[in-house]
Amino acid sequence: VEALYGVSVLSVNTIKYAGKSKARYTKAGLVRGRSNAFKKAIVTLKEGETIDFYSNI
């Protein structure tokens, strides 16, 4: 993140989200499945620094 966006990173915290159970009622009956699990990273930057995600649009 520091090399890509040119900012100073203070800390990185990660969160693992479990997939949720999903169910759908169809003509064939109940169809069950799960959504995918995913991981999220929270990056804390140095005071006053921001990342402009919309500059390339």
Image (spheres, rainbow, N blue to C red):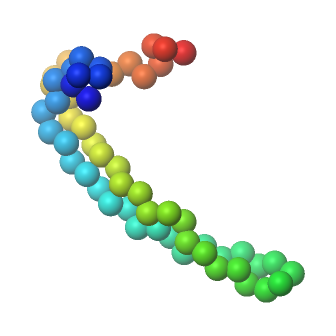
The number of numbered discs placed on residues in the rendered structure image is 0
Q: Residue furthest left?
A: 10
Q: Residue furthest front?
A: 3
Q: Position of residue 33 (x, y in %)?
A: 60, 75
Asked if residue 46 lies left or right of residue 37, the reply is: left
Q: Is residue 55 shown above or below 1?
A: above
Give the residue displayed 86% in from the left and 81% down from the top: 27
Would you say residue 50 is visible in this rendering? no
Q: Position of residue 5 (x, y in %)?
A: 29, 20
Q: Quadrant of residue 6?
A: top left
Could you tell me which quadrant the C terminus lies in?
top right
Q: Position of residue 29 (x, y in %)?
A: 79, 86
Q: Position of residue 4 (x, y in %)?
A: 29, 22
Asked if residue 9 lies left or right of residue 52, the reply is: left
Q: Quadrant of residue 22?
A: bottom right
Give the residue displayed 15% in from the left and 39% down from the top: 11
Could you tell me which quadrant the N terminus lies in?
top left
Q: Residue furthest right?
A: 27
Q: Is residue 15 shown above or below 18?
A: above
Would you say residue 16 is visible in this rendering? yes
Asked if residue 56 lies left or right of residue 14, the reply is: right
Q: Residue furthest bottom?
A: 29
Give the residue displayed 40% in from the left and 67% down from the top: 18
Q: Is residue 13 shown above or below 24?
A: above
